[in-house]
Every structure is written in C-alpha cells, then in structure tokens.
Amino acid sequence: MIRFFITVLFLFPCSAWSYEVQEVEYGGSVQGTVTLSGEVPDPKAYNLVIFPDPEYCGRISNGHGWRLLRDFFVNEERQLQHVVVLLEGVPVGKPFTLSVPRVEARDCRFLPFTTVVRSGHGVEVVNMDPVMHDIQGYETSIVTGTRVLFNSPLPFNQRHQRGNLHAMHDHKPGKSLVRLFQLSKKRRTFVMQCGFHAYMESWAIAVENPYYVLTDEQGHFLLDGIPPGTYDLRAWHPSIKLVSKQQVIIEPGGALTVDFDLPAPSRKKTALTVRTPPRFTPAALGREFTIEPILERQ
C-alpha cells in the first residue's frame, strides 16, 4: 500500500480542455482511505430562539435550545466521511451524467452537506419542510473572497400540516427551485446557506469529469474505469482550506491504493458556541414554548 501525505494548494487550476466521452479499454482504478489528523473541531452552535421557526427547527437540537452545525463526520478510527475525492486532468472517459445535483431542505438542514456541481449548470433545491427558507448561493475563494450567485426564496411545503410543526411527517417533496450559475475563472468552491436559518449549509466543489466520489462512513473511496494516464488525485473537504493532491499514474488494468491524511483546522472560539445560560430564551419572543429535540438530540 502506498501512503501519501498532504500537499498544500491554494487554488484549483482550471482545465484547458473540454471533457469528451469515449469508451475506456483496460481502465484502471484507485482506492484508499481518508483520515483526519489532529483534534476534531467543535461544531458551531446557534441559539434557535434568534432564528425563525425555533420549535420546528429545534426538533434537531442539543436539548437546551441550540442547533449544532457539524462539518466533520469521523468514526472511532478517525476515518473521515463526506470528503470529495476526484481526479483532475482526465480529458476523455466514461459518460459524464451529472448536470444539476439535488439538495433537500429537510428538518432545517441541507442534505447532503457535501456534494459536487458543474460550472455552467446549476443546482436544484427542494423544500421538504412546512417552513419557509431563503436560498443564498455563493462562489468562494481563499484569495479573492466571496461572490453572490443567486438569492431566492423557497416557499414552505404546503403538502405538510403547517399548524402541527412537531408532526412526524414523511417529507413529501414540495416544489423544486432550480438555479443555474457560472463560476468565475479559477473558482471551484460553491456554498449555499439559508438566509433565515444560518445553521443550514451545503458545500460543493466544481468537477470537470465524472471521476469523483464521496468517502463513506469508513473514509473509503474507489474510482474505477479510469483511462490509463497521469492525473492529479485530490481530496477536498469544505472546512479544510488547504487541499491535498497526489500525482498518480494509472496503468492499463492497474489498481492503486492511495491514502490521505487531512489536517484538522484549528478553530478559534467564536460567538458560535453554546452559552449557559443563553442570552435569549423563548421569553424574549413574548411567549413561552419548549424546544424539544424529538427527531435528533445532538
């Protein structure tokens, strides 16, 4: 087994060619595991009382009125889930079927938390909640900052009982919202946030070919059907700003094993932490109610 360690990059270079579909003969494969080194950062914490719909959104909370935004999903072996592993520099290969990925607004969170997009295509957002969301899409870069791509309201799902916010409904999909966008040159990172519920985030990296995959619960990935050649294999996590890569040589019918160790970021204490007692309680809204984590206690 070959084990590679992180190489620091600040930007994803844009491809100088367009991808073409072509039958792959004697394709190779690459697999491996992504692990996290260092201490897992604490999740961000949001006082539900200061955002709309605290009762419904509080169905997922810590039991004390706070919603936690977890961005690292690590098992006991420190293997990291939801990392996008992708090959760059692949000019031809298997069909590239991804066009517009689907993101669900479900229980006041975006699912999936990490995905991929294609520049010039877009994203579909479906509201599964009986509450209103506000979809804000951005492209972002460490060097050049953030640019707004779109901002659109997402009406509440009328297929669910508005008056019974604690109902354990089966999340029938409401109307979908599709927004197309073109990323700026050299920008590859896309993020969505709800303008009403700041703890709702979904991140994506723009891909230029179909050779990408997200790591599973064991941090494992597998890419196959790769045309022989020399490519860059990259691992991307939205909360790790320095991206790792390793050059790989795919032999005809060959199989590689490449492991990644990603460094946990050092996150300073911010206002987004649980405060006891909280500065604001349901009494601040002029009425008494209980925030119950009946769906998930974080």
Image (tube, rainbow, N blue to C red):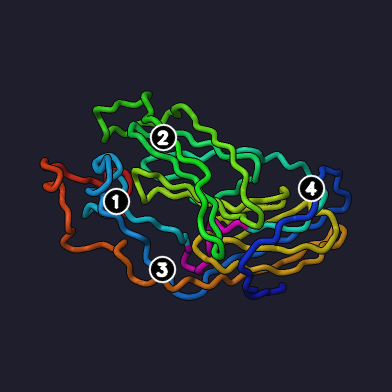
Segment tinted magenta in the rendering: 74-84
Query: Left or right of 93: which side holds 1?
Result: left
How many residues crowd around disc 4 within 10 Å: few (fewer than 14), some, or many (20 or more)? few
Circle 4 SS class: loop
Circle 2 SS class: strand
Residue 152 point in image, percent of width and height: 45, 36
Circle 1 SS class: strand
Residue at image point 78% right, 55% down:
16
Amino acid type, residue under disc 4 in the picture: Ser
Label number found at residue 61: 1
Label number found at residue 153: 2
Residue placed under numbered mark 4 in the picture: 18
Looking at this view, name the residue that lies furthest to the top: 159
The one nearer the camera, 144 or 276, is 144
**Image depth: mark 3 or mark 2 in front:** 2
> From the viewer's perspective, is residue 61 above or below residue 261?
above
Residue placed under numbered mark 3 in the picture: 41
> From the viewer's perspective, is residue 18 above or below residue 29?
above
Q: Are marks 2 and 1 in contact (CB under 8 Å)?
A: no
How far apart marks 2 and 1 lie (CA) works out to: 24 Å
Amino acid type, residue under disc 2 in the picture: Pro
